[in-house]
Image (cartoon, grey):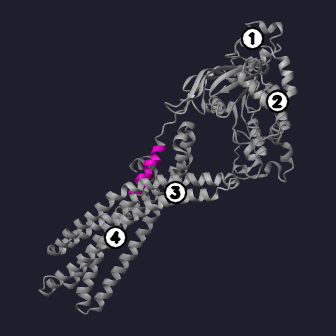
């Protein structure tokens, strides 16, 4: 909690000073109130003096008005501090979460992060608000009341010395057993959030398999588990107030008994006894409220530690201020390479960049695993793809296809080996530039609430003309259904794109990646919901777009990476990478792989028609050894 105050409390420091200062003034008036009442009783009621009663009554009224005024100021300071800090903490958490790599996000889990950014921040906000309002009030009121009571009479003060340790013992007994439960409560809230997220996001699957009762039972078990812990805390906490008030009331009875005797012998006045009772009540009530404050601060401390755990998590993927790559030089080299058939292109003094165009993508003995000791999801993969080439990746479920392409935009860092983009290690790239260069179409189509226009401009750094958006939609084969919508580009998109079919969502996500013309387009099985005809038209349109590349975006032809389960989707690629449990089972063109790679041949035989297979067998040329690596030329005929 202290760490959060250091990080976010700086600009609210004046509020945290003004608020308690105002509350201190209110406490001073509260401490003076019993003395004024004592004077009212002794000089007014005891002496039958109405004017004295009215006088002291007016003093009490004025003190109450002034106290309320300072209380309102304190309340405002508390609100400004707690809400301001809560907003800043949420903003910092959200920003930091977006800086974390996939590895850290996998470690925390989405439900836990949501709980931390909502419930845990709420607990901290409550603690800050009560800290500004009450942290100085109740301890100061308790100590001040005790000192004032002892100043009235030392004999009656002995009752304080008996009652206060008794309440402190009860407080220690309860708190020592409650604190561990608060940490458990937050963890069990994470579990409830996880089950809610799974049940609500997968509602269609739950209903399709008639598992509503099962999900209700899962939720009920998690809720009951959390409720049982909360009840256990409640039972322990319920001891606190009754026992404390019992001790306080017994103390009041003792004061009245002993004080009555002293009044009879003339050692005390009736007003002093009443003042002593008031101070006794204020002291013990303050202790009760301090105990409640400790409960709140204990919860907030558990929440603050969870928040700090996220904020202190150092992202494993950073660019370290890496300088941006000069992509225009690569674009110039690519355009010169197109003209290398002319005699002047071979003149090194005139065209020094002709022979230095690096591969668009290069994997050099790359391996990756999800955590230390885990089996490699990608194991010793090596290949390269020249600028403007097309790489197809195919393999069985769980073969590591998505993990492999996640290494290109550096969503994960390779455990061993090197991934290079345009000749530079991805770890040496400026992250913003790397992900600007790469257009990623994820396996799961995800759209944001808003409009089609706002989703297409998601990568936006400048305002796009409608023609640019329509060109992207046309390439993605999405322009027809978008034009048929009443609002076209301004048609609403619900959260997750739930108001569109799976195929429509996929085409919109492809269009989103194409809007700013990436130099590398990665399509991670992003056409799985499309029919074969639309899939073919999409691939043809992407090839045509890549051919127009020099007109756009630094003159670098677009390199395409296609991940798919379909042979028909990848067979026309310049190079196909066949993955088997993270390892490369085959690498080369379609004809070569059909002749040399048993796994690829089995995939083809399971998907292609007999006529296609017979034609393939006639065209296949056996190769003596499987290809370990390959490089695809952007312009093979030159």
Task: Give the spatial CA distance, label 3 vs label 1.
Answer: 69 Å
4 sits to left or right of 555: left
Q: Residues within 10 Å of mark 3 (few under 14, many from 20)?
A: many
Instruction: Please provide percent x and percent y for residue 364.
Output: 61, 19
Where disc 2 sits, the SS reads: loop
Determine whether label 3 and label 4 are within 8 Å by CB: no
Tags 2 and 4 touching, CB below 8 Å: no
Q: Nearer the viewer, mark 4 or mark 1?
A: 4
Q: Which mark is residue 351?
A: 1
Residue 568 position by quadrant: top right
Magenta region: which residues?
298-310
- Of the two numbered discs 2 and 4 on the same chain, state the one appearing first in sequence: 4
Mark 2 or mark 4, whichever is nearer to me: 2
Measured as percent of width and height from the top left, residue 39 is found at 25, 82
Q: Earlier in the sequence, mark 2 or mark 1?
A: 1
Q: Nearer the viewer, residue 123 or 147?
A: 123
Gap in angstroms between the C-alphas marked 4 and 1: 87 Å
Q: Earlier in the sequence, mark 4 or mark 1?
A: 4
Q: Is residue 239 above or below residue 615?
A: below
Determine the residue positioned at 28% across, 81% down.
37
Q: Residue at 72% across / 39% down in the picture?
A: 462
Task: Name the mark on residue 222.
Answer: 3
- Residue lying furthest bottom: 48
Residue 88 visible in the shown view:
no
Image coordinates for residue 316, horizontal then vertical, percent: 52, 33
Question: Alpha carbon of mark 2 to alpha carbon of mark 4: how far?
Answer: 77 Å
**Location of residue 114 in the rendering, given as x and y in whole percent from the top left corner:** 55, 50
Q: Residues within 10 Å of mark 2 (few under 14, many from 20)?
A: some
């Amino acid at each position: 909690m202290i760490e959060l105050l250091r990080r976010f409390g700086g600009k609210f420091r004046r509020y945290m000073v003004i608020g308690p200062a105002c509350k201190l003034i209110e406490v001073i008036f509260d401490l003076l109130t019993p003395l004024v009442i004592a004077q009212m009783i002794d000089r007014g009621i005891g002496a039958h003096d109405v004017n004295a009663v009215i006088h002291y009554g007016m003093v009490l009224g004025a003190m109450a008005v002034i106290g309320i005024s300072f209380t309102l100021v304190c309340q405002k300071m508390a609100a400004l501090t707690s809400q301001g800090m809560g907003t800043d903490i949420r903003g910092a958490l959200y920003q930091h979460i977006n800086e974390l790599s996939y590895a850290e996000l996998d470690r925390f889990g989405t439900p836990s992060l949501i709980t931390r950014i909502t419930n845990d921040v709420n607990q901290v906000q409550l603690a800050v608000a009560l800290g500004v309002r009450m942290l100085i009030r109740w301890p100061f009121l308790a100590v001040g009341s005790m000192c004032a009571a002892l100043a009235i009479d030392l004999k009656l003060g002995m009752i304080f010395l008996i009652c206060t340790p008794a309440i402190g013992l009860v407080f220690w007994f309860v708190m020592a057993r409650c604190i561990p439960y608060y940490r458990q409560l937050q963890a069990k809230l994470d579990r409830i959030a996880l089950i809610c997220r799974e049940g609500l996001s997968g509602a269609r699957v739950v209903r399709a398999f008639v598992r509503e009762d099962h999900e209700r039972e899962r939720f009920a078990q998690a809720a009951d588990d959390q409720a049982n812990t909360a009840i256990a805390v409640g039972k322990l906490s319920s001891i606190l107030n009754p026992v404390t008030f019992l001790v306080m009331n017994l103390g009041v009875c003792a004061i009245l008994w002993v004080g009555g005797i002293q009044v009879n012998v003339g050692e005390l006045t009736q007003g002093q006894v009443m003042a002593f009772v008031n101070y006794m009540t204020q002291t013990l009530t303050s202790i009760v409220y301090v105990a409640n404050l400790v409960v709140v601060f204990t919860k907030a401390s558990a929440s603050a530690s969870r928040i700090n755990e996220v904020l202190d998590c150092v992202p494993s993927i950073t660019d370290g201020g890496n300088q941006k790559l000069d992509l225009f030089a690569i674009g110039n080299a690519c355009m010169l390479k197109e003209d290398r058939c002319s005699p002047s292109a071979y003149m090194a003094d005139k065209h020094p960049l002709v022979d230095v165009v690096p591969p668009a993508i290069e994997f050099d003995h790359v391996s990756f695993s999800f955590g230390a000791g885990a089996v490699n999801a990608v194991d010793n993969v090596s290949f390269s793809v020249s600028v403007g080439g097309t790489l197809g990746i195919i393999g069985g479920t769980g073969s590591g296809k998505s993990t492999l392409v996640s290494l290109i935009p550096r969503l994960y860092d390779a455990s061993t080996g090197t991934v290079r983009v345009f000749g530079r290690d991805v770890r040496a790239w400026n992250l913003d530039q790397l992900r600007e260069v790469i257009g990623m179409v994820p396996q799961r189509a995800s759209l944001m609430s808003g409009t089609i226009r706002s989703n297409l401009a998601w990568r936006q750094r400048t305002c796009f003309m409608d023609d640019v958006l329509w060109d992207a939609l046309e390439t993605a084969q999405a322009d027809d259904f978008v034009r048929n919508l009443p609002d076209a580009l301004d048609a609403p998109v619900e959260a997750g794109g739930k108001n569109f079919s799976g195929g429509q969502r996929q085409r919109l996500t492809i269009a989103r990646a194409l809007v700013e013309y990436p130099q590398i387009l990665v399509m991670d099985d992003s056409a799985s919901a499309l029919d074969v005809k639309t899939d073919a038209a999409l691939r043809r349109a992407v090839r045509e777009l890549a051919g127009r590349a020099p007109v756009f975006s630094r003159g670098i032809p677009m390199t395409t990476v296609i991940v798919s389960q379909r042979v028909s989707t990848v067979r026309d690629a310049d190079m196909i990478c066949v993955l088997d449990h993270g390892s490369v089972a085959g690498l080369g063109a379609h004809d070569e792989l059909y002749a040399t790679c048993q796994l690829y041949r089995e995939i083809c035989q399971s998907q292609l028609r007999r006529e296609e297979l017979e034609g393939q067998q006639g065209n296949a040329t056996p190769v003596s050894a499987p290809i370990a690596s390959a490089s695809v030329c952007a312009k093979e005929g030159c």
